Amino acid sequence: MADERPDMPTPPGRKPRKPRKAAPARQPLTQDVIVDTAIRVLDAEGLEAATMRRVAQELGTGAASLYAHVSGKEELRELMLDRVAGEVRLPVPDPARWQEQLKDLAVEIRRVFTSHRDVAQVSMGLIPTGPNLLAIAEAQLALMRAGGVPPRIAALAVDTLGMFVDADAIEGTLYAAKLSGGAEAMEKFHGYLGEIRDFFKALPADRYPNVAAMADALTSESGEARFEFGLDILVRGIASYVDAPEPS
């Protein structure tokens, strides 16, 4: 057998051996690495693409090796959501501004969630147990309690606020997907809204008097304006329980 030692000279009449390239060192597989990779897939292609198999492919390993760090798809998705939630900037409670802060925090959660495509879908039906999701809940509760919201109302409200933000974020990603074609897609969408407006106006006034009469108002506001309106209604409702007896 020929000597393969790199310090040996090339024998006469033979071509010099090319030095063998060392294989790149593989990144140690950890839960953090798996979650980071899954979020990259999410941001590029959406939640459904971020499977255990796909993440393993991105890491150059088999799916079975991931199960030593993550129990399965459901846990992976929860870890992804909690990692994303860590990007939310949390306020320091100011009792004089608690309503404004509560609304600002909801806007911030929506901004972060929608920046990661359809990750908000994971939050629906999920009781938060991750440290970052719990930190958001703690911040919301702290704001309401600083404003004098009774404990029972604050506990119910934190769930209601979460459902509202999640639902709006999910709808926002659906619209974003429709408008992903740039100016042409935007023009087509506005044309569709115009057709819907004309359809409402053409409805039989004896059967749908308000829809027909309010066609312009029903189709004029932006998604942001609708979100802020709904948020204002929720926070005003929460505030109405301050210094008021709790419902039995």
Image (spheres, helix red, strand yellow):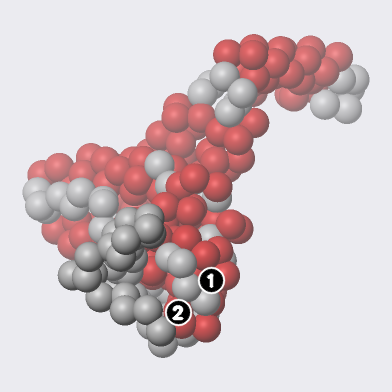
| Residue displayed at 47% across by 73% down | 61
The mark that comes first in sequence, 1 or 2, is 1
- The local crowd at label 2, few if under 14, some if 14 to 19, many if 20 or more residues have their Cα within 10 Å, is many
Measured from the top left, where is residue 211 in percent x and y? Answer: 74, 24
Q: Secondary structure at mark 2?
A: helix
Q: Can residue 173 be seen from the camera position used here?
A: yes
Instruction: Say which amino acid is labelled 1.
Output: Met
Q: Which residue is mark 2?
A: 66
Taking 227 as reference, is 132 left or right?
A: left
Q: At 38% across and 59% down in the image, what residue appears?
A: 14
As rendered, which of 169 and 154 lies closer to the eye? 169
What's the distance in space between the residues labelled 1 and 2, CA to CA? 7 Å
Q: Is residue 240 above or below residue 21?
A: above
Q: How far from the left and from the top, in percent, is residue 169?
A: 49, 45
The residue that label 1 is drawn on is 52
Residue at (86% x, 20% y) in the render: 203
The picture quadrant where one finds residue 8 is bottom left
